[in-house]
Image (cartoon, helix red, strand yellow):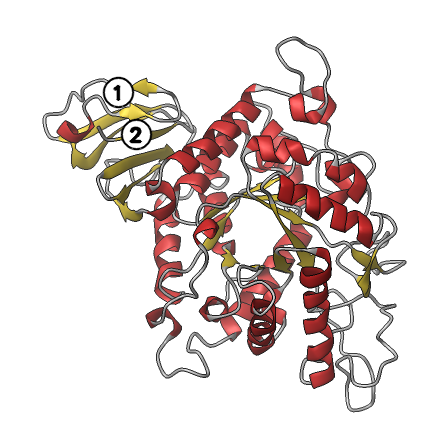
């Protein structure tokens, strides 16, 4: 009720986001699915081996201009306990480098970098970043930086350096889709500069890795070379590609964004298309990426309107359950855990309204002490994933049900553990029969709702009634 006008505004505000996604998808499609150094298709090769913690990770994005009212590294450091208490394991921080003034989009955006070697005074200093990383490590958190190498600000300090940017034969800058200059990665000096830039943050500041913005706009062999150099300092560096390029996970990257997944969620929940799109997208990704590839599953981030606005509050929770039970790496955008609906703003400071969430005592406290139903839900969701190895290291098998247009259903299995996941992606009640034996789920435990399931009424197939945007995560006894 009352969600339609708000949703319309949210979709209209997402035009620039969809343009960016379209470009990234175009870059992905333009790249061959056969590795240039291999005769076999990428999908027939194995993804790079990652440390064990990777599959158990939960990534939490901090947008510096939103996470705290101050928008500084120092202020963010004082609130890291909130993320640790939530249960996330990797913090990804939006771009921190000095950005250009003014931006071609109007006010400055962190994605137009003026100086790759310095922290923007808006956020603090390199010493502040080092202190943040040290505190995160004390809390058992890893920190990755957002790097923007595919394009720069129009006043980048390197623009006068010969051969550093792509130019026409007449010497005119070749601009990106965002009307920003593009480094020329055919120049070995450019590659050396950016490789050393990455090494600095790892070696001298203690950064644990990077999220590469528009990773498909930079040659894959650059990322491969950078990976070799970083591995000599820290072989467990985390590399997250903002792209869905299959070749990336052969060597350079550990995780890839999964834009078609978000598109499938939107098509199903917002546009009413069949829930089969989720399974079809899952299969398509695995048919094109290396075996064992890791995908980022998200329903919210800085390029989109908030999940509660786009999907609606109940559907946002249902899609989060899907994010955390599929085989992949779940992702939370700061404020999602308390249902923040403040529209993301890249060009200005719009702080998350943490103060409106109060504990049962109705007293205002620091964000580390705030409690509400949604926050408890996300803590439970993350804890479930930590407790159940089948959700992080188990195989995923899709199973059929009697309402495939509305309900997704699959099993996660590891050794003797088996978990059945049912998620209703519609606003209608749905009673489904699932192609698993009813006898196997008599007295099964509903993990998220902390209850024991009643015996199925069906003599053969498991049956269950799901409310609107309802879900079941049931562990077999």
Q: Nearer the viewer, residue 34 or 240?
A: 240
> Residue 125 at x, y = what percent?
84, 51
In primary-sequence order, the first of circles 2 and 1 is 1
Left or right of 251 on screen, residue 212: right
Query: Is residue 221 positioned above or below 401 on the image?
Result: below
* Crowdedness near tag 1: few (<14), some (14–19) or many (≥20) residues, C-alpha within 10 Å: some
Q: In which quadrant is the C terminus drawn?
A: top left
> Residue 447 at x, y = what percent?
35, 26
Residue 417's quadrant in the figure?
A: top left
Residue at the spot 70% in from the left edge and 38% down from the top edge: 343
Q: What is the spatial separation of the Cα atoms under label 2 and label 1, in whole angstroms? A: 8 Å
Left or right of 450 on screen, residue 103: right
Q: Nearer the viewer, residue 71 or 50?
A: 50
Whether residue 42 appears in this view of the structure is: yes
Residue at the spot 80% in from the left edge and 79% down from the top edge: 173
Residue 67's quadrant in the figure?
A: top right
Whether residue 346 appears in this view of the structure is: no
> Residue 443 at x, y = what percent?
21, 21
Query: Is residue 60 positioned above or below 466 on the image?
Result: below
Q: Which residue is mark 2?
A: 474
Q: In which quadrant is the N terminus drawn?
A: top right
Element marked by disc 1:
loop
Q: Which residue is mark 1?
A: 453
Say how many tags the image has.
2
* Crowdedness near tag 2: few (<14), some (14–19) or many (≥20) residues, C-alpha within 10 Å: many
Q: Nearer the viewer, residue 10 or 228?
A: 228
Residue at the spot 39% in from the left edge and 73% down from the top edge: 42
Residue at the spot 33% in from the left edge and 71% down from the top edge: 44
Most extreme residue toward the left, as rendered?
459
């Amino acid at each position: 009720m009352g969600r339609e006008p708000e949703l319309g505004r949210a979709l209209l505000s997402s035009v620039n986001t969809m343009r960016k996604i379209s470009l990234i998808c175009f870059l992905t499609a333009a790249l061959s699915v056969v590795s240039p150094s291999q005769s076999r298709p990428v999908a027939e090769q194995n993804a790079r081996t990652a440390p064990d913690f990777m599959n158990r990770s939960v990534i939490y994005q901090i947008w510096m201009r939103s996470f705290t009212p101050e928008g500084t590294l120092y202020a963010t450091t004082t609130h890291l306990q909130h993320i640790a208490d939530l249960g996330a394991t990797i913090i990804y921080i939006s771009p921190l480098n000095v950005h250009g003034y003014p931006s071609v989009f109007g006010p400055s955006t962190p994605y137009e970098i003026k100086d790759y070697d310095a922290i923007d005074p808006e956020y603090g200093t390199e010493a502040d970043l080092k202190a943040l990383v040290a505190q995160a490590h004390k809390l058992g958190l890893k920190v990755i930086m957002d790097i923007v190498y595919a394009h720069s600000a129009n006043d980048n300090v390197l623009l006068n350096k010969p051969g550093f940017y792509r130019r026409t034969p007449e010497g005119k800058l070749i601009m990106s889709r965002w009307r920003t200059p593009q480094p020329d990665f055919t120049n070995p000096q450019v590659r050396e500069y950016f490789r050393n830039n990455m090494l600095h943050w790892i070696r001298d500041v203690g950064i644990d890795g990077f999220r590469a913005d528009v990773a498909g706009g930079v040659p894959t062999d650059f990322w491969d070379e950078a990976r070799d150099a970083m591995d000599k300092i820290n072989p467990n560096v985390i590399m997250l590609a903002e792209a869905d390029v299959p070749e990336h996970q052969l060597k350079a990257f550990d995780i890839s964004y999964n834009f078609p997944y978000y598109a499938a969620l939107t098509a199903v929940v917002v546009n009413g298309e069949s829930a089969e799109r989720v399974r079809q997208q899952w299969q398509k990704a695995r048919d094109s990426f290396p075996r064992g590839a890791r995908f980022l599953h998200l329903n919210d981030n800085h390029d989109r309107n908030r999940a509660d606005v786009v999907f609606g509050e109940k559907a946002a929770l249902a899609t989060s359950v899907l994010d955390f039970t599929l085989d992949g790496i779940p992702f939370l955008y700061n404020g999602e855990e308390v249902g923040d609906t403040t529209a993301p703003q890249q060009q200005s400071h719009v702080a998350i309204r943490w103060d409106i969430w109060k504990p049962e005592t109705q007293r205002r406290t620091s964000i580390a002490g705030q409690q509400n139903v949604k926050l408890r839900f996300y803590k439970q969701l993350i804890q479930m994933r930590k407790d159940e190895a089948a959700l992080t290291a188990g195989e995923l098998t899709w199973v059929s049900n009697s309402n495939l247009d509305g309900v997704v259903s699959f099993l996660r299995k590891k050794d003797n553990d088996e978990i059945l996941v049912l998620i209703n992606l519609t606003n209608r009640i749905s009673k489904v029969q699932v192609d698993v034996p009813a006898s196997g789920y008599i007295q099964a435990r509903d993990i998220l709702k902390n209850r024991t399931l009643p015996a199925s009424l069906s003599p053969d197939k498991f049956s269950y009634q799901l409310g609107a945007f309802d879900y079941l995560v049931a562990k077999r006894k």
